[in-house]
Image (cartoon, grey):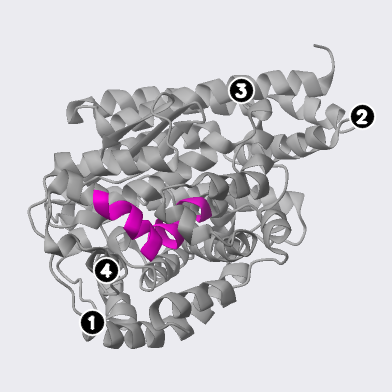
Amino acid sequence: MNKPYQWLEARFNRLSQLAHFNHLANWDQATQMPSGGAAARGEAMAELSLIRHELLTATEVAEQLAMASGEALTAIQQANLRAMQRQYDLSVAVPGKLVRAKTQAAMAAENAWRQLRPANNWTEYAPILKNMVDLVREEADARVEYASKQNANITAGKAARYDQLIDLYEPGCSSAFIAPIFARLKQTLPALINQVSERQASQPLMPLPTPLHAEKQFQLARGVSQKLGFDFERGRMDLSHHPFCGGVPDDIRITSRFDPNDLFDGLMSTIHETGHSLYEAGLPKSLRGQPVGEAQSTGLHESQSLLFEMQLARTPEFVSFLQPQVEQIFGSHSAFASDNLYRHITRVSAGHIRVAADELTYPMHIILRYEIEQALMQEQIEVADIPALWDEKMQQYLGVATLGNDKDGCMQDVHWAAGEFGYFPTYTLGALYAAQLTASLRKTQPDFGAAIAQGDFGSIKHWLSQHVWQHGGRYTTEQIITMATGEPLNPDFFVNHLKRRYLDE
């Protein structure tokens, strides 16, 4: 193994194996680990993160990357080398002691969040979050300093921090790209939400029977996930405080949570995470263990989960497929009629909780978080200011008050406890990508709706495999979207989708 590229392949395959166990440890923390194990798990995870950091940032990696750039490589190998270089740059920018400190802090903060959020205890949570914000600011500064040395167009300073964090999740993306898109949504969605709400107010909505036992909801969600294509021989489904999808393509873990008073909260979360899992499982097998074989971006990943949850699962045809399964598990009831179920899953109503939001109000939840994160990183606000600012923006954007209700306000998400600043914008980018991809998918499949009604998702998954999954990280997100749809990201697809579904326009 004397060729630099071959050496690098071996090194990154080793890193991939360690990442596998990192995913499993995170899954266990969220689903099985007793709360008393948090400190010990934090030490172990911090040590693992440091080992991976040292393996990736070793001097010989930089040397081999430089030498490999002069080798005669295939197009795939060149793309893999670019992805290797990116991973190296992202890692070497941050000192190992900071990587370790942030990992330990995240483990402690997540465990605290699970205990303090149900108690609405912002007072004890705030200093824990402040510690994380301080660490993320330090990380962002290190990334800005490194990036400015690599690229003269990047100016060091607080204003550049947030772009470096966004780039972790959406390569090449920045506030300059996001700002006009979010401005368009802020201008368009409020009036649209009001129109739809007024229209739906006159539509009958029969309440669903409650309580709906969590065990039966789990059974329904598991069956739907399997029908969509989740392979339970290469994955499992569990409960957690916050739904997620983790693991690796041949060992995928999805989680959900179920509310006895809401049939669709847990079910739609499961469909969402199943979409993530299908993308992971559909990544090119020949490139497993290599950076180019991984998903291209978080926004593209979210597009796959939202395509299944929002674009597909909220159609009348999907409800026709779902309705018999609901009655089989929960029994016959007039409220389980297909038209009533459809009105429930397409009901637009501004609420406190992001993960329970409908597709019209959801972007406003994201824009709020985006604006607060940006202000935090630029030190325009501090952690102590978050509850009041959260309430102000929630009232402004959605007419919902949260002051004094932090568990359903600024404490509701685990992302900040985990140090994942810059992640939130990818949810709405994903919704826009999903609408654009679905528009192209429908053009190629005249029987799109009929197949869904029959529970046949094969042709949909085949199209996604051909246009998204098989590419892994070979192309940029913009290139993948353009190849699949004929143009770069265009918010018109999302807005037109909402008007068509909710206003028959």
> What residue is disc 1 on?
203
> What residue is disc 2 on?
72
Cα–Cα span, label 2 and label 4: 60 Å
Q: Earlier in the sequence, mark 2 or mark 1?
A: 2
The answer to whether 190 is drawn above or below residue 15 in the figure is below
Q: Does the magenta segment cover residue 317? A: yes
Of residue 488 and residue 86, the one placed in the foreground of this image is 488
> What residue is disc 4 on?
339
358 vs 491, left or right, is left
Disc 1 is placed on an element classified as loop
> What residue is disc 3 on?
55
Question: 10 Å neighbourhood of mark 1: few (<14), some, or many (≥20)?
Answer: few
* Disc 2 versus disc 4: nearer the observer: 4
Disc 3 is placed on an element classified as helix
Q: Residue at x 60, y 19 (%)?
A: 14
Q: Position of residue 164 (x, y in %)?
A: 59, 54
Cα–Cα span, label 1 and label 4: 11 Å
Q: Which residues are magenta?
A: 303-324
User: Disc 4 residue type?
Assistant: Asp
Cα–Cα span, label 2 and label 1: 65 Å
* Camera sees residue 112: no
Marks 2 and 4: CB-CB under 8 Å?
Answer: no
Marks 1 and 4: CB-CB under 8 Å?
Answer: no
User: Disc 3 residue type?
Assistant: Leu
Name the dominant secondary structure of the magenta segment: helix
Marks 3 and 2: CB-CB under 8 Å?
Answer: no
485 vs 211, left or right, is right
User: Disc 1 residue type?
Assistant: Gln
Of residue 29 and residue 100, the one placed in the foreground of this image is 29
Q: Residue at x 35, y 82 (%)?
A: 193
